[in-house]
Amino acid sequence: MSLQNRQKPIRVGVIGVGRGMSFAQMAGHVDMQLVALCDTWENKLQEAANRFPDIVTYTDYDKFLEHDMDAVILANYFHQHAPFAIKALKAGLHVMSETSACKTLGEAVALIRAVEQSGKTYMLAENYCYFAYNQEMRRLYQQGEIGEIRFAEGEYVHPMSIEDSCRLAPGMNHWRRWLPSTYYCTHALAPIMYITDTRPVCVNALSLPYSQQDQQWPRLRRGDAAATILCRMDNEAITSLQGIHLRGHGNWYRLHGTRGLMENLRTRGEQEKLRIVHDPYDMVEGDVSEKIYIPEFPFLADLARKAGHGGGDFFTSYYFAEAIRTGQPPALDVYRAVDMTIVGIQAWRSCLANGAPQEIPDFRQEAARVRYADDNWSPYPKDQGPGQPPQSIHDYVEPTPEQLAQARSIWQEMGYTGE
């Protein structure tokens, strides 16, 4: 597959010059032309502009949307994506949004309706689907290698030091400090959905608070350390999800089917390897009892290997551009984006009810949209009030003066001057 002899480049703007720099750098590799950047952090915006001297910069999102372009990529804050996407769609622009798609079920309904009304491409930039081994597992699953999925596990574990946490999330009201433990679930869930084409229909979940014995516990965080989420899928399979601030950084996906097993290896340094297992009584011609190998990307491997997140940053940009050019919905369309996002929201409801099951409504159906269109249940600071959820199953523990001083020293060094 080649990127040569394509139509004229798709003109794209990126909002968010932190995470968004990966998409800005990738644009030219997929025949997109970066034309504009937007961010409210002016110093960082100027630094980004120095790297891309031919683009126009904006601190006002509405002005940014008036720029002559075809598409926008949203790499702004986690809980802001749906309103920004809806504005862009109404402006006649295609949208690729970082995870997550929305912060409430009401926003999910509004987002889906905006996509349908616009006729534009919407894609979730869930890059973990496009690791080489996950793309290989999708190929094998679609060919029937392990039969029908019955049980799956997805694990995204990403611990960090207090200092790294402060650098990643500057300010007391940064979204990462207010995030419930279930909300960042798409890195664990999305590959399972992508590989098998199943969707969750209900969830049960339990949240794990931070331990007082954890010396790296960043007390500036209001949320819990981690969670386990059980999803019932639409073919009655079960998917178990684990993450996020546990010791032992890594990503792991395991799929048990009706005639075999697929997983990437868990040992450090070997997670890129894929393992396929067949029991003797399930084997057909061409099967082997166990096979372990490093799969290659399906195409454009040289470009993918140069991109971030295991090549995922290349393929999200690639498939976004392909969807715009062909008019065909991407695999990670708005319906799948919303499905995997609201698992985290409904799982938090389950955690606060000590594991009680919660439905994952199918917003392809108008009846489901009507039920949840006004559901604005949200844990974020600006939404606090009667009926809104806490960020932890326990009360927030105030940071010590020493911890606050350490954090503010790091933020000052970064050039962050907010609260």
Image (spheres, grey):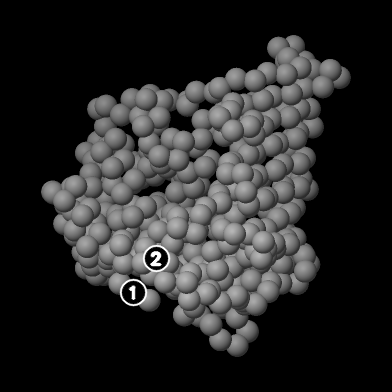
User: Is residue 224 at least partly visible in the picture?
Assistant: yes
* Residue located farthest toward the right when viewing the structure as drawn: 281
Q: Position of residue 259 (x, y in %)?
A: 78, 27
Q: Quadrant of residue 148?
A: top right
Q: Quadrant of residue 73?
A: bottom left
What residue is pinned by disc 1? 418
Q: Position of residue 8 (x, y in %)?
A: 22, 39
Q: Residue at x 76, y 17 (%)?
A: 289
| Along the viewing direction, whichever of 297 and 39 lies nearer the viewer | 39
Q: Are marks 2 and 1 in contact (CB under 8 Å)?
A: yes
* Residue located farthest toward the bottom when viewing the structure as drawn: 386
Looking at the rendered image, the quarter that the N terminus falls into is top left
Q: Residue at x 72, y 47 (%)?
A: 239
Q: Is residue 239 left or right of residue 179?
A: right
Q: Is residue 212 left or right of residue 128?
A: right
* Residue located farthest toward the left when viewing the structure as drawn: 54
The mark tally for this picture is 2
Instruction: Mark 2 or mark 1: name the one nearer the start of the chain.
Output: 2
Tag 2: residue type? Answer: Pro
Q: Is residue 248 left or right of residue 8?
A: right
Q: Is residue 283 above or below residue 70?
A: above
Tag 1: residue type? Answer: Gly
| Along the viewing direction, whichever of 360 and 225 lies nearer the viewer | 225
Q: Is residue 206 above or below residue 155?
A: below
What residue is pinned by disc 2? 170
Q: Position of residue 207 (x, y in %)?
A: 70, 63
User: Is residue 178 at least partly visible in the picture?
Assistant: no
Q: Residue at x 19, y 47 (%)?
A: 51
Q: Position of residue 147 (x, y in %)?
A: 74, 30
